[in-house]
Each structure stands twice: as C-alpha cells, then as structure tokens.
Amino acid sequence: MKQLPLFILGLWGVVFLKCWADGRLNILLHSIFHWLIFATGIALILLALVGLRWLPQTGKKCSYWSIILLIITGLALILFPPRPSFSTLAANRSNIELGDSELSFFSAPEQRSLTDWVRLINSYPDPELYAGDPVLVSGFVLATPAGPPEIARLLVRCCLADATPVGLPVSWPKNQPWPKPDQWLQIKGVMAVESHHGALRAVLIAKKIKQIKAPIRPLEP
Amino acid sequence: MQQLITVWAVFQGLLLEAMPFLLIGVAIATVAKALDPRGRLLNNLPRGPLIGPLSGALLGFALPACECGNVPVARRMIGIGAPLGMAFGFLFAAPVLNPVVLLSTWAAFPDKPWLLLLRPAGSLIVALLITGLLQLQSEAKLLNSELLAERRLSQPLIDVSLLNRRSGLIGSAISQPQSSNKTNHGVKEFIELGALLILGCAIAALIQTLIPRDLFLALGEAPTLSIISLMLLALVVSVCSSVDAFLALGFADLVTPGALLAFLLLGPVIDLKSISLLGRILTWPAIILILVGVSMVVLLIGQALNLVML
C-alpha cells in the first residue's frame, strides 16, 4: 500500500494532538515545549493530507520494521497514557542543589512552596533560622532508603528524563503509620531542628496532614 | 511493575520532546534538496581538511537544531555530494555551535563565563579532530551503504568510476529521486529516522530509570573519574543539547569543572538516543570509532581544564 507512509504521518499527527489535549504533557515535559507538540501534530496532519491529495506515490518503500514500529508505538501512546511513579523515579536520583532565592525570605513562611523552602534552606543552611516558622506545603511522598519518607516535588528542565527531586525531611505523627510513596499530601506544621547523622538539620514537624489529588501540573519548572 | 510503568512515562517524555526536532531537521533537509537538488551551493563550500569542517561547524548558526534535527540535514548534505569534512563538521559541532544552545548555556551558567567560551571552543576542537580521524578512512568504510550509493550518483565521474556508482553499464541502476518525489523522500526519511529514534529513546529510558543516577555522580570529587562518570551520564541521559545546560546546573557544584565541561561536550555529539540515528549515516565500525575518539578527546579536554582550575 503506497500511501501507508502518509497514513503513518497522519497517525502521528493524531498522537501528538492527543498528547497535547489529554493533559499528559503536564507530567512529561516542561511547559515551554507544549506549543511545539501542538505545532508538530498540526504539521504532521497537514503533511499527510497534502500528500494524500497531491503527491504521486512513487519512489522507494519504507522498511517494514520501521512502519510496524511506528504504528505500534503510535497506538500504544494513544491507548496507554503515562502513569509514572514519581517516587520510583526520584529514588534513583539524588536531590539537587538549587540556586539562591533570597526573595523567599520576603514571603511569609506559610506562603512558601516546598521548592521555596528547599531553595531557602540550601542558600542559608543554618536550621535555627527557621525553627518555629509555620509551614503549609504540598507534594508527593518520597520514600528514602533509611529513615522516614520526605515530602517532595520533581523539578524538570526539559522532560521527565531529567526530572530531579527536591525534598523536605518530615517528622511524621508518632501515632500514625508513615504514608505510602506517591501519595499527594498537604502538610501543615512547623519547622524544627533535629540531629541527623551527627549534624543539625531543618525538619518539618507535621501537625495536620490532608490527602489531596495530584495537581494538574505536578512538575515544577 | 512500577519501574516498567515509569520507564514507559520517561520514554514518552524523551520521544515527544525529540520528535519535533527530528521533523524540523527532515523538513530543512527536504527543502534544501528541493532548492539545490545537485548540491551546487554546498559543493562550492570549502573542502580543505581544516576549513571544510570549520565551515560545516559554523553552519549551525544558520540551522539551529539539536542533534536529532542535525542528523537528517547532515545525511542530506552527504547524499548530494557535499564535502564529507564539511558534513561531519556540521554533524559534530552544530548541536553546540548554534545560538539556541549558546544562549541556554549562558542562561544556565551566567556565573561561569569560562564555560560559555570553552563549550563552543571544545566542541569545535572535538569536531575538527574527529572529522580528521574519520577522513583517514575511505568513504566506503565510513558511510552506510544506502547513503554511499546515493552520494556516488551525485559525484563527478572524475572522482567515482561507473563501477563504484553501480549504475550505467555495470550493476543495477539507482534512481536519482525525481523532482516530484522529493517530499515522498522526506516522508520516508522521517519514518526511517523516527523508528530509530523510538529505539534510542526506549534504551535511554530503560537505562536511566533502572540505574541510579547517583552511581554517575558519586565520583564527583575525583578529577579523572568525575569526568568519566559525567561522560557516561551524558551518554545515558540523552537530553537535547538545547537544554542539557539546565540539567547540568543541578549537579554543577558537585562535580569538577572538567567533568561539567565533558558532560556538555559529549552529549551533543553522541548519546544512546542518537546512536541509532547515526546508523542512517555511518557504518557501525565508524560509529564505534566516533564513540571512542570523542570520549578520548573530551576526556583530555576535561583533564586539561581540571589541571588549570583545580
């Protein structure tokens, strides 16, 4: 079937538009690339339509394996949206050093996001600076190899491939089991100082924990 | 099971980010072929061993695309008979020597002006040396057989015999694409390269989800091992050259300056995602030669920088 390559182009146009429309890009790519996915979908569909209408179908055929692989992958992308485990992804990647964010000191403690808190603590590591500050943050539960889970977010510069976790240590209520990895929580509490492997560090004492839905845009830029 | 589901998501992220750049590259290559079917413009560009690759490298400023987009353009250059040195110079240096990548490097590291200077300079050195190394081999040993046949059709008979062309009196004829058929050729190119990109993204997603990234960063303090580990990370992570500087920002302070530069030099030339794409241009021995050659040159550049800065 000589027109099959053009149908494949059309199929991939649909794949790109479906990915753009169904919201999955929010968990896969940095937002600066979203328009590129939409434009690529439109371009592929237009190319397929123009080709089917006007181009004579001559020339060499594509290899069968390429055609089969593109069709199977395209259909799989449509049928199986991504449901990544952020905790699994983050477990293989160490927390990163975030740049300075002096402005964070100007915002009220309870208005700081989790990323703001991690930035601030990275910039000014003395935990005594934050002891007693009220905290209201949300994030997913990130299991740690030794010790209680942290509350974390993933930072993305390009796509999920470079996602890197930023996490805040949490002191969970003693009378409750630790939450399961990947649960999204909103935690209200206060900052405190604790001794960890012989050094002092800032820790969030969780006072009120609410399970929440994953946000529409769970990745932080 | 959780890991496989996560691999599937990382694969989608990599593929959706890379495929538009592949399409842009194929579109540029197809338009270039339509405007200049016999490559007269490219054939008039310099051919010298130094000036050839240099002019190819500088073409990156005219065609700003990352490595996925550069492969179809370089393939087209070679197919229409452009000087091989120029095409290789473009293939290896243009993913760094273009305004988008230089701007993103500056945006990520405004406090490291040396990086803004050494990244393009290092990339140029890598491209010149690897192109020189490749040109010690014959075209037949370097180029993918399909591309070689196409290239020989475009070369003057003074350079290539009828026997080499596999057309005319001896061998089977290979048809030069007709003008009405150039877009079909572009469609075929997109499908062939798209399938290879899928394979590359699948391998990269598998490895980087299953192998802890800390393995690569654990050796950050040791001058030589830090360079080698960051080179391995660049191979595995396979992010596009226009954003790799932002990724490197996350661990820039944990590793030596030489390792940071090595990460930013190696990835744009070769990584798991692009190895399969390079197979559409080069033979496997040539790809292995590039991998080994680039690794050695980048290691030396990283070592030299560590020697100066540590």
Image (cartoon, rainbow, N blue to C red):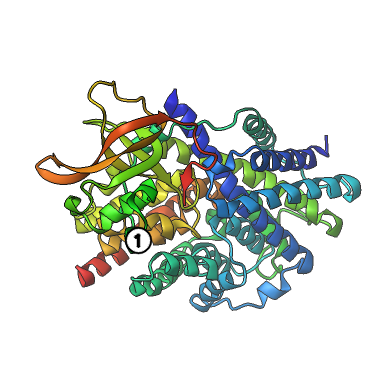
Query: Callout 1: helix, strand or loop?
Result: helix
Quadrant for the C terminus of chain B in the image: bottom left
Q: Position of residue B53 (x, y in %)?
A: 52, 72
For disc 1, the neighbor class at 10 Å (few under 14, some 14 to 19, many from 20) is few
Nearer-the-camera pick, B19 or B151: B19
Q: Position of residue B242 (x, y in %)?
A: 50, 60
Residue found at x 83% / y 39%:
A3
Query: Can you see residue B298?
Result: no
**In the figure, residue B124 lies in which quadrant?**
bottom left
Residue found at x 60% / y 57%:
B69
Left or right: residue A25 versus residue B23 is left
Q: Residue furthest left?
A: A198
Amino acid type, label 1: Phe
Nearer-the-camera pick, A122 or B233: A122
Residue found at x 65% / y 43%:
A20
Left or right: residue B300 versus residue A68 is left
For disc 1, the chain is A
**In the figure, residue A24 lies in which quadrant?**
top right
Q: Position of residue B72 (x, y in %)?
A: 63, 56
Q: Is residue A152 above or below residue B70?
A: above
Residue at the spot of label 1: A106
